[in-house]
Image: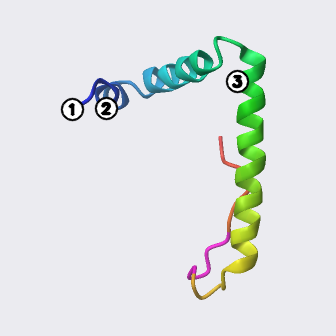
Amino acid sequence: MSSSAVLTAADPQAEIDYQVEAALAFHDEDAKATIATLLGDIKHLRLQLALVESAMSRGMTRGWLPVYDREV
């Protein structure tokens, strides 16, 4: 079992902290670049969700409708 899997099971907050640190490390600790990348990802994923919503029939998704905002 990987250390990441152990962190997730033991402490969900530790997993979130690890992911935040990994994202910052990817951008050489530049918080603005990290946030800009995440906002770009959100925009891209919302577009993809809109495209899927328009392309799929209701029967194919058994009545499922996408939700664009997550519950916190």
Nearest to the observer: residue 8 or residue 47? 47
Q: CA distance from mark 1 to mark 2?
A: 7 Å
Nearest to the observer: residue 15 or residue 43? 43
User: Residue at the location (72% across, 72% down)?
Assistant: 53
Identify the residue at the far top of this view: 29
Q: Are marks 1 and 2 in contact (CB under 8 Å)?
A: yes
Give the mark toward the camera: 1 or 3: 3
Is residue 69 left or right of 29 when viewed as pictured?
Answer: right
Image: 46 above or below 2: below
Residue type of the residue flagged with mark 2: Ala
Q: Which residues are magenta?
A: 61-65
Image: 3 above or below 66: above
Q: CA distance from mark 2 to mark 3?
A: 24 Å
Q: Position of residue 52 (x, y in %)?
A: 69, 70
Residue that badge 2 annotates:
5
Residue type of the residue flagged with mark 1: Met
How are the colours assigned in the image?
A: rainbow
Q: Position of residue 18 (x, y in %)?
A: 48, 20
Q: Is 34 contained in the magenta span? A: no
Give the mark toward the camera: 2 or 3: 3
Residue that badge 3 annotates:
34
* Label 2 crowd (10 A; few <14 / some 14-19 / many >=20): few
Assign the C terminus to one quadrant of the image: top right
**Callout 1: helix, strand or loop?**
loop
Q: Are marks 1 and 3 in contact (CB under 8 Å)?
A: no
User: Residue at the location (43% across, 28% down)?
Assistant: 12
